[in-house]
C-alpha cells in the first residue's frame, strides 16, 4: 500500500512524515521546495502479530507495511499553469491513496487559518488536472475518428469519458461516480487523481489539538479525516523511552502513536484486512482486500499457491487466544478446512494446501 502525502507549501507535511516514520528529514518552512519526495516504509502496528510472535517464537516476524511518500508542497494554480512536473505526476499516479495535510497551527508565516479553504484549493487542483486530462483524451479520440479509426472500443471509451467529463464539470471527484466494471476497465490505466481514496490529515498545534470539534465535524461531512499534532508527534517519535512517550501522550490526550493511528485508519478507509501465517520459521501478516477469497489470499503469498490451491487450513486469531494453542483450537472444533471460495476474515490464520 502506498500513501502519498500532499498539501500546500508550509502545511507541515514533512513534520507529519517524520512523526509517522521516525525519520529526521530536515524541516525548514523557509527553504525552497525540493523536487525529490521523501520515501519511507513503515510497519503496520498490529498487536496481534506481537502476540503471535510471543506464542510461536519464530526465527522471523514480519509485519505488514505501508509506503509513505512525502511530496513537495503545491501552489495554487499548479495544474492550470502546467507546473505539475512529469516526475510528480508519474509518481503520484502510482499511489493507492492520497493524504492531504492541511495547516491548523499558528506560526510566523501565516495569518488567519482556514483549513476548509485549503482542502478545497487542493481538491480543485486535482480535479482540474483530471478534467484537463479527460478533455485532451477526448480530443485525441476525435482525431482518430476523423482518420477513420472508429472502433467499438474507442466509441465506448468516448462515451465513458464524456460521462466522466460531465461529472468533473459539476465539481465532483471521480471517487463519487459509480462506474460499471467495463467503464472501470477502460479508464484503469489513466489513474485519475480524484478517483483515488482521499483522506485529510488536520495538522493542529499543541495548543488547539482536540479542540476543533466544529471544524472536524464540518470537514467530515465530505472527507475522511484524522487529526495529528505534527510538531508534538514528531518530537514524540524521536523518544526512545516508551514510558516517557506514554506520559507525554497522556498529557495531550493521544491514545496511540501517529503511525499506528494512520495505518489503522488507512486500512479501514481502503477496505484492507490482515490474515496471518504462523510457524517456527516465520510469523507474518498479509494484506488483502475485504471480501477476497481464500484462493486470492493464497495468491498474496505466492502465485504457485494460488495456481495449485487445494484447501486452506484455517482458524481465527481470537479462537487461538481463547484456546491457548493450536492443539486446543482443534480440540474445541474451531479448526476448519476451507475451499477456494471461502471469504477470508480479518484475523484468520491460514495454511495453504496446494499442489503444482
Image (cartoon, grey):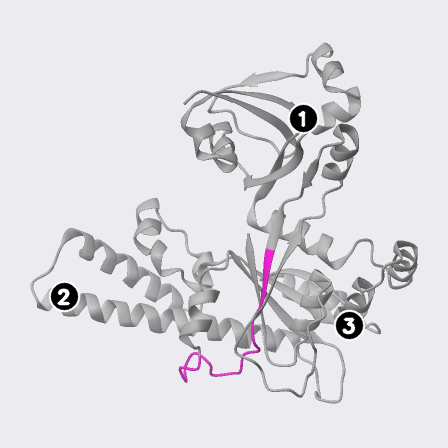
Q: Do residues under tags 1 and 3 come within 8 Å of each other at their CB atoms? A: no
State the image quarter where residue 34 is shown: bottom right
Tag in front: 1 or 2: 1
Q: Is residue 11 left or right of residue 92?
A: right
Up the image or down, 65 lies above or below 282; here it is below
Mark closest to the chain's N terminus, 1 or 3: 3
The residue indicated by pointer 3 is: 231
Q: Which mark is residue 316?
A: 1
Other residues around mark 1 within 10 Å, as few (<14) / some (14–19) / many (≥20)? many
Mark closest to the chain's N terminus, 1 or 2: 2
Tag in front: 2 or 3: 3
Q: Nearer the viewer, residue 55 or 324?
A: 55
Mark closest to the chain's N terminus, 2 or 3: 2
The answer to whether residue 172 is seen in the rendering is no
Query: Label 2, label 3: how many angstroms apart (C-alpha)?
Result: 53 Å
State the image quarter where residue 188 is shown: bottom left
Residue range of the region highlighted in magenta in the rendering: 67-83
State the image quarter where residue 335 is shown: top right
The residue indicated by pointer 2 is: 144
Does residue 81 belong to the magenta stretch? yes
Other residues around mark 2 within 10 Å, as few (<14) / some (14–19) / many (≥20)? some
- Residue at x 24% of width, y 67% of height: 138
Question: Element type at marker 3?
Answer: helix
Does residue 56 belong to the magenta stretch? no
Q: Percent x, y for residue 110?
A: 70, 87
Q: Nearer the viewer, residue 353 or 131?
A: 353
Q: Percent x, y for residue 164?
A: 34, 62
Q: Percent x, y for residue 275?
A: 61, 34
Query: Label 1, label 2: how many angstroms apart (C-alpha)?
Result: 55 Å
Q: Is residue 228 left or right of residue 151?
A: right
- Residue at x 46% of width, y 57% of height: 176
Amino acid at each position: 500500500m502506498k500513501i502519498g502525502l500532499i498539501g500546500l507549501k508550509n502545511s507541515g507535511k514533512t513534520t507529519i512524515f517524520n512523526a509517522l516514520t521516525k525519520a529526521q528529514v530536515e524541516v525548514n518552512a523557509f527553504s525552497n521546495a525540493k523536487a525529490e519526495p521523501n520515501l519511507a516504509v513503515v510497519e503496520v502496528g498490529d498487536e496481534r502479530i506481537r502476540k503471535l510472535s510471543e506464542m510461536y517464537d519464530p526465527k522471523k516476524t514480519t509485519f505488514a507495511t505501508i509506503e509513505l511518500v512525502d511530496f513537495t508542497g503545491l501552489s495554487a494554480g499548479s495544474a492550470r499553469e502546467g507546473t505539475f512536473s512529469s516526475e510528480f505526476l508519474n509518481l503520484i499516479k502510482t499511489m493507492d491513496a492520497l493524504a492531504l495535510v492541511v495547516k491548523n497551527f499558528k506560526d510566523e508565516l501565516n495569518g488567519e487559518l482556514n483549513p476548509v479553504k485549503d482542502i478545497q484549493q487542493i481538491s480543485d487542483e486535482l480535479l482540474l488536472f483530471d478534467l484537463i486530462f479527460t478533455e485532451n483524451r477526448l480530443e485525441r479520440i476525435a482525431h482518430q475518428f476523423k482518420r477513420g479509426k472508429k472502433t467499438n472500443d474507442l466509441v465506448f471509451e468516448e462515451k465513458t469519458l464524456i460521462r466522466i467529463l460531465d461529472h468533473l464539470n459539476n465539481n465532483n471527484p471521480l471517487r463519487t461516480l459509480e462506474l460499471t466494471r467495463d467503464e472501470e476497465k477502460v479508464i484503469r490505466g489513466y489513474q485519475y487523481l480524484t478517483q483515488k481514496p482521499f483522506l485529510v490529515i488536520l495538522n493542529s498545534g499543541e495548543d488547539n489539538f482536540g479542540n476543533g470539534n466544529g471544524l472536524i465535524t464540518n470537514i467530515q461531512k465530505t472527507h475522511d479525516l484524522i487529526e495529528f499534532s505534527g510538531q508534538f508527534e514528531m518530537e514524540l517519535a524521536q523518544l526512545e523511552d516508551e514510558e516517557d512517550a506514554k506520559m507525554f501522550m497522556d498529557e495531550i490526550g493521544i491514545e496511540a502513536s501517529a503511525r499506528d493511528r494512520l495505518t489503522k485508519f488507512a486500512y479501514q478507509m481502503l477496505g484492507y484486512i490482515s490474515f496471518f501465517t504462523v510457524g517456527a520459521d516465520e510469523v507474518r501478516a498479509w494484506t488483502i482486500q475485504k471480501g477476497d477469497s481464500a484462493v486470492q489470499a493464497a495468491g498474496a503469498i505466492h502465485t504457485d499457491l494460488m495456481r495449485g490451491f487445494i484447501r486452506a487450513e484455517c482458524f481465527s486469531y481470537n479462537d487461538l487466544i481463547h484456546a491457548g494453542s493450536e492443539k486446543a483450537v482443534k480440540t474445541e472444533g474451531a479448526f476448519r478446512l476451507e475451499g477456494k471460495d471461502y471469504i477470508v476474515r480479518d484475523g484468520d490464520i491460514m495454511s495453504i494446501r496446494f499442489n503444482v
